[in-house]
Image (cartoon, rainbow, N blue to C red):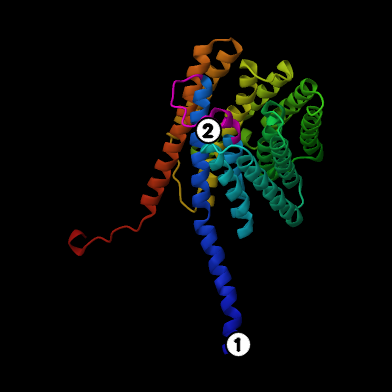
Amino acid sequence: MVVADKDKNPNSKRVAFLQRVRRVGPFPLMAMAMAALLAALWAGLLRLGWALPLLQPTLPMSHGPLIIGGFLGTVIGVERAVALGRPWAYLGPLLTGLGGLALLIGMTGLPGPLLITLGSLMLVVVFGLILRLQLAPFTVTMALGALLWLVGNLLWLFGWPVYQIVLWWLGFLTLTIAGERLELNRVLRLSGKVQQLFQLAVAIFLVGLAVTLFHLDSGMRLAGVGLVALAGWLLRYDIARYTVRKTGLTRFIALCLLTGYVWLGLGGLLALFYGGVTAGLAYDASLHTVFLGFVMAMIFGHAPIIFPAVLGKPMNFSSLFYSHLALLHLSLLLRVGGDLMIWLPARQWGGLLNVVAILVFMANTVRAVHQATRDASPKKIASPSRL
């Protein structure tokens, strides 16, 4: 009996360790992601011309890497680690979170890019295990997205300009989201032909992405065709077309998805029309229609599901959620309209309201978690005198 107890003890300690990592691990990582997001928003306002304190000299140039690597890369890494249930998988978001902090404090040179690149390598390793456990079109699509992020980060690490590699980062987010939607749409039992159309859209985008390495303009236009095709597929075949007729949270999520797909399609059209622009107002419009209109709408829609799963905290749906969704779309219309019409005040105010929309989203999320936690607390037992 003594020997048996000794055999069981290490296993029980391991189980306790895993439970502790799963319970506590996501919180400091998500805190680093939120710090990167707030710094990126501040940097974005500086780039738009708002007279704010600079904080540190390299902050404006770190806007994109902070959003994609420090914030989104960390959040996606945490989500994958929680789903996989392996403690080592948290190393990836830890590295990207630390890389984001390095950029935030203005650490120059390799530390920030190197840490974020290593974090993206870990995400590729995570998806390698996921593919071994479940080889399916949706896991392959998300794994391709992780690979695009790694390639983009390697190019960044070796000194390629951001305008040359930002499409790789965009591909990471787009294919990650598209893969998740493909997984959820399995309930519709889509035909083989319909799934082939999805794969064709992804293939066109990937070919365009590869071409950008040699001819930016042609590659960008071809990638734009792929984005338009992917947006059209999602609008036509995503289950959100049916769930939008529901009520409550289900309807809210569907509206986030469908409006986000419209922005994805518009981003593809702008890429097709303007081609390989490297700066300026058309560049701003092409990128932010996807990174804000599409990606942020997806975050708004999935947050009420993903945050409770990742953080282990309940979250109540509220009609207030429509406030940050509406403000995001209206402010982005103002910003993109200002870009395309060369109306700088509209662009500047639209960008400011973009930031406000994200801050309202964060406030509404905290409020929803607080309400759900309060509602779930044990009720006081009524005293006999009150019965």
Q: Residue 271: x percent and y percent?
A: 71, 21
Q: Is residue 287 above or below residue 36?
A: above
Label disc, if present, on residue 40 of the rendered structure: 2
Q: CA distance from mark 1 to mark 2?
A: 56 Å
Q: Residue at x 63, y 25 (%)?
A: 287
The percent coordinates of residue 343 (x first, y second) are 54, 10
Along the polypeptide, which appears first: circle 1 or circle 2? 1
Badge 1: few (under 14), some or many (20 or more) residues near its Cα, within 10 Å?
few
Magenta residues, as a range?
49-65
Q: Residue furthest left?
A: 385
The reply to whether residue 375 is in sight is yes
* 330 lies above or below 303: above
Up-down: is 113 above or below 42?
below
Q: Secondary structure at mark 2?
A: helix
For badge 2, the amino acid type reads Ala
Residue furthest to the bottom in view is 1
- Residue 101 spot, x, y in % from top left: 53, 42
Percent position of residue 42, x then y: 48, 30
Numbered disc in front, either 1 or 2: 2
Residue 84 position by quadrant = bottom right
User: Residue 333 vs residue 217: left or right?
Assistant: left
Q: Which mark is residue 319?
A: none
Return the residue found at the far front: 109
Taking the magenta stretch, the answer to whether it contains residue 181 is: no
Three-letter amino acid code at disc 1?
A: Val
Q: To which residue does mark 1 refer?
A: 3
Say which quarter of the image contains residue 1.
bottom right
- Placement of the C terminus among the 4 image quadrants: bottom left
| Magenta segment, prevailing SS (helix, strand or loop) | loop
- Asked which quadrant contains residue 179, the reply is top right
User: Which residue is located at x 36 percent, y 50 percent?
Assistant: 374
